[in-house]
Image (spheres, helix red, strand yellow):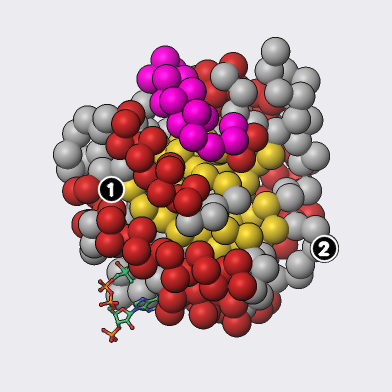
Amino acid sequence: ALPQQVKIVEVGPRDGLQNEKETIPAEIKIALVDRLTAAGFANIEAASFVSPKWVPQMATSAEVMAGIARKPGVIYSVLTPNMKGFEAALAAGADEVVIFSSASEAFAQKNINCSIAESIARFAEVAAAAKLNNIRLRGSISCAFGCPYQGEVAPASVADVVKRLRDLGCDEIDIADTIGVGTALQVQHVMQLVAQDFPIASLSGHFHDTYGQALANIYASLEVGISIFHSSVAGLGGCPYAKGATGNVATEDVLFLLQGLGIQTGINLDAVVDAGQFISTHLGRKAVSRAGNALAAK
Ligand code: HMG
Ligand code: MG
């Protein structure tokens, strides 16, 4: 049986916007997060405290975190690659910090400028500080199903990083398809493998839709018991260090699927559609969500 309830982590404000070339004013990002809060998400990835030289769009993260209207109980997450990022996250009052590594050595070098092992060593300090400050800790693993630089990624490499992040005390771990190349049976295989090392209830699927496989991969993940998924409103996104990578799977499409399956999310789809139209209008392009655009046209 499929899970009866699913947690959607809305990553549009971070993963969705980080690759936009034009600087988006903080007010617009704040308005987007506030709309997502009102739509009922329990977890929103709102910002990232990374080097502004590497990802200029996220330079307004402190302003965004200070400006959003927080709803009690909602987890507002931020990315923190190192202690400098963690200190900024702490000052900003983040509810959850995300340490992010990779199942591919080549991608770790491009994205965070260090090896997987070095990243884990760097994260140990962040993890300890998170625990000390009672901040939730999430770990993210890029390129779990393929890498733009090294090609194939062995499932054992994903399992290895899962164990290392588990040992750092992560409350949740994301299995990410950075470039959207995973397919359904491969996804089931990797999810089942890593579930041997980490509680399945705290594993999430983070699917980019580059090859149009994300919804199928979500369904495949549901079949093996995954109940946390990441998605971006309006299908925003792309990773600056994964050339050609497109957005995360669109939240509207995921919600439409889950609604049809009778799976509870606590999220109001119409409100998400409105949020998607809001940000797409600002960006001057059509939302990359089939369900979102169909519902908006009704
Ligand atoms: P580095 O250059 O090796 O680091 O970058 P460094 O420690 O030598 O610092 C260099 C400069 O950056 C210094 O400034 C630092 O102060 C500054 P300078 O002295 O030259 O003026 N700096 C910072 N500034 C602000 N906040 C910080 C910070 N850290 C250093 N936290 C580093 C290493 C990790 C910092 C860099 O590579 C970086 O910021 N990378 C982030 C890359 C990124 O954000 N990628 C996108 C997010 S991950 C993703 O999208 C994948 C995901 O969605 C899952 C999936 O789909 O795969 C999560
Ligand atoms: Mg991503």
x then y, percent, for residue 64: 60, 73
User: Label 2 vs label 1: CA separation?
Assistant: 35 Å
Q: Is residue 208 above or below residue 96?
A: above
- Contact, CB < 8 Å: mark 2 with mark 1? no
Question: In percent of the image, x 70 and y 13: which residue is there?
Answer: 1
Tell me the amino acid under the disc marked 2.
Answer: Pro
Q: Which residue is mark 2?
A: 72
Between residue 100 and residue 275, name the one nearer to us.
Answer: 100
Q: Is mark 1 within 8 Å of ligand 1?
A: yes
Question: In percent of the image, x 64 and y 73: which residue is there?
Answer: 133
Question: In percent of the image, x 43 and y 33: which residue is there?
Answer: 209
In the rendered image, the quadrant that contains the C terminus is top right
Task: Give the main secondary structure of the magenta stretch.
Answer: helix
Tell me the amino acid under the disc marked 1.
Answer: Ala
Q: Which residue is mark 1?
A: 242
Ligand 1 appears in which quadrant?
A: bottom left
Is residue 173 within the magenta segment? Answer: no
Q: Which residues are magenta?
A: 184-200
Return the disc, 2 or 1, that comes first in the chain's sequence.
2
Answer whether residue 49 is visible to the viewer in this image.
no
Q: Is residue 236 left or right of residue 160?
A: right
x then y, percent, for residue 120: 36, 58
Answer whether residue 45 is visible to the viewer in this image.
yes
Specify few, some or many for label 1: CA neighbours under 10 Å numbering under 14, 14-19, or 20 or more: some
